[in-house]
Image (tube, rainbow, N blue to C red):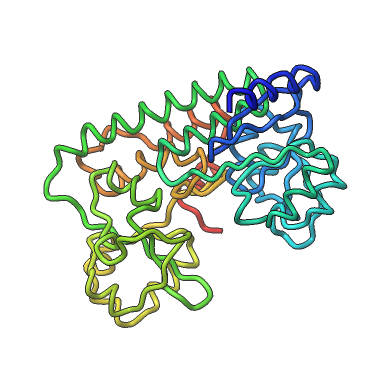
Amino acid sequence: MTKKILFLAVLAVILQAKVVVDSDGKKVVVPDNVERATPMIGAFVQMSAMLGNENKIISGAAKLPPPMSKIFPKIRTNDNKSGALGSSVETLIASNTQVVFGPVGMMFDENSKKQLEAAGIAVVKIDKFASPDEIKQSLLLIAEIFGDESVKKAKEFNAYFDENVKFVKGRASKINPKKRVLVLNFNSGNLSTISANDIGAHYIEIAGGVNVSSQLFKGDFKISKTINEEQVLIFDPDIIITNSRESLRQIMKISSFQGLKAIKNKQIFVVPSGVYLWSVRSAEGALQPLWLAKTLYPKEFKDLNLEIKTREFYERFYNYKLNKSELKEILNPTK
């Protein structure tokens, strides 16, 4: 193992490259000066741009979400018509990208990975993003791919993230009784929720809430889990959180839900969404504990001004000043 590490180090010097360690602990040689990189998921596009690499990103998406393309107009796309990031090895090779990074195993088989490497493209597996700590670790790894200035920004962001978590956790830990929260989404005619291992469940816990679906689904699963109306009625949560305005409309239409505590008390809320949705695995999730705390316990967090915090985040990490309509759309999404 020592000989292998030494060999990689020597190779990196010869090739004017550096060595990074991926999520599995594997050492990967990447160019010392990365000018073209392809993050494999949208959250990593957002993170890379936030770290100051907007003009180095070749996204695998057919097009970017409007807020992302507006705030980071220099991000390029590789015109992959399928719309799935990283789904076409040929398209990635043709884009002249130097590095591909993200949850490799979810998108490439071993043969595809070998094709990329044979074309001189470094493939860095980054697939840890199920908790705030994992988000911070993944952000640092992405920063290492791009270089020193990005590493400084990543450390600044991680300190900011820690501050938010510490503030919310410190105050919320003293609140009793805890609000019972159900993350409930409606997509393609199905209701779904999250597991105890989802990052959304971690955010709920930080904010002093109880993620009720953790009682039913204790195991891990990818992204979401389908549930039925009867299970929602049994949960009868104090608060329902959903990921889109359309999802909220569909949930509100379900006749059997009209007797739910959360519906009767008008305690159903849409998660904020800016460059990326706050409740999932992006760096904008650093704001999610603040929003949740204010949503779950408005009296206890009455001094917390989400508008100010959101403006500050965008100016500090995106170098972008939000106008009133943009701020309103982020905190109360209609699209």
Vertical order, 251 against 67 (above or below): below
Rendered residue at 27%/32% (across/down): 303
Rendered residue at 17%/50% (across/down): 178
Residue 230 image point, x, y percent: 28, 80
Q: Residue 308's image quarter?
A: top left
Rendered residue at 33%/78% (across/down): 229
Position of residue 61 in the picture relative to residue 189 (left or right): right
Q: Residue 81's image quarter?
A: bottom right
Of residues 6 and 248, which is closer to you in this image? 6
Q: Report the number of numbered marks.
A: 0
Rendered residue at 49%/30% (across/down): 313
Residue 265 image point, x, y percent: 23, 64
Residue at the right extreme of this rendering: 94
Q: Quadrant of the N terminus?
A: top right
Residue 102 image point, x, y percent: 62, 45
Position of residue 165 in the picture relative to residue 116 (left or right): left
Of residues 58 and 298, which is closer to you in this image? 58
Residue 273 image point, x, y percent: 51, 49
Residue at the left extreme of this rendering: 176
Of residues 107 and 118, which is closer to you in this image? 118
Of residues 319 and 161, which is closer to you in this image? 161
Q: Quadrant of the C terminus?
A: bottom right
Q: Residue 255's image quarter?
A: bottom left
Position of residue 220 in the picture relative to residue 135 (left or right): left
